[in-house]
Amino acid sequence: MSECEGMFRCPICFMPMKMDQLKSLICTNHHCFDVSRKGYLNFLNRSPKTKYDKRLFQARQTMCQNGFFEPLIERISRRIKQESGTKKQRIRILDAGCGEGSLLSGIREKVSPHTANGLLSVGVDISKEGILAASKAYSDSIWCVADLAKCPFANQQFDFILNTLSPSNYSEFNRMLANDGTVIKVIPEKNYLKEVREVFYGHTPRREYSNEGTVKHFADHFDLLDMEHVRYRVALDRALIGHLVRMTPLSWGATEERLQKMLDMDSAKITVELTILIGKTFA
Ligand SMILES: [Zn+2]
């Protein structure tokens, strides 16, 4: 982490930062942020209250480790390998809104052996619980608790910024992307987890779901090069159905009875349908 100190900037005054005895990062105006004993950096003095708790992140980690997002990880990794091609320098990836870190770690595992000079992977999330779970499970990335609106990184630090099923901050993404850097944003499609929705909310048709606004907003900020559609179904057993229920915010609006109905299922086939937006900074 200390060899990467030049990557950071103070989220309060934007000045450069230095590592102090591997215990904290201090800016030239003496704003100080601690390195936790678990090895992550905390750039927030106060963590906001959120329904994304430890149980949710643990469930998500279990789902990921059982391959729930494997085809997505495969597609993103392939794209990163293509884009970075013959790049001689170290490849730097930021996962903005990384949650419990499984996606970034899965991508790191696939991309890393194909790089000439290594890979730096950094995950940032506003949830301390998410980052704590990430730092416990995966030690080869740098994990930071921070607000996406005030990212603690200097300008043009990353070749890739990932943003998966999570809110964005495009002005910050633009600021942090290196020349010719790539943004990879994953958004849900109409049929994403549709079987879960059917159990939780019945068969009443959901209002027509459209990503048009999201795609347009993305294209306003980046040169939209490509949209990759990913669709697959995953067979889950009873235990994994339980983890799926715990990992999805969809369950927050469901009645106890509907939740139980899902938890009582012995098996289920679940649809994952997503679109990957690939963008570059405008020249
Ligand atoms: Zn400062």
Image (cartoon, rainbow, N blue to C red):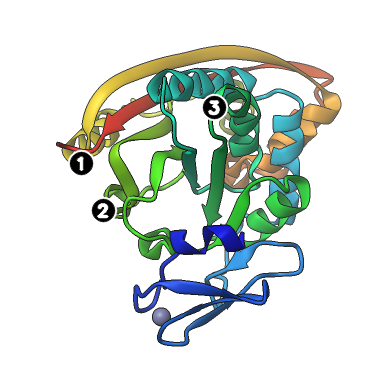
Please tell me which residue lies in front, 165 or 195: 165
| Rendered view: 131 above or below 191 | below
Q: Are marks 2 and 1 in contact (CB under 8 Å)?
A: yes
Viewer-side label of 3, 2:
3
Residue 62 is at least partly visible in this image: yes
| Rendered view: 113 above or below 246 | above
Q: Give, as a three-letter code, the residue at label 2.
A: Ser
For label 3, the SS is loop
Q: CA distance from mark 1 to mark 3?
A: 29 Å
**Looking at the figure, which quarter contains the C terminus?**
top left
Residue 50 lies, in percent from the top left, at 57, 62
Which quarter of the frame holds ligand 1? bottom left
For label 1, the SS is helix
Residue wearing tag 3: 115
Instruction: Place residue 153 in its image quadrant.
Output: bottom left
Residue 77 lies, in percent from the top left, at 53, 23
Residue wearing tag 2: 171
Residue 278 lies, in percent from the top left, at 33, 27
Label 3: how many Cα within 10 Å (few below 14, some 14–19, many 20+): some
Q: Earlier in the sequence, mark 1 or mark 3?
A: 3
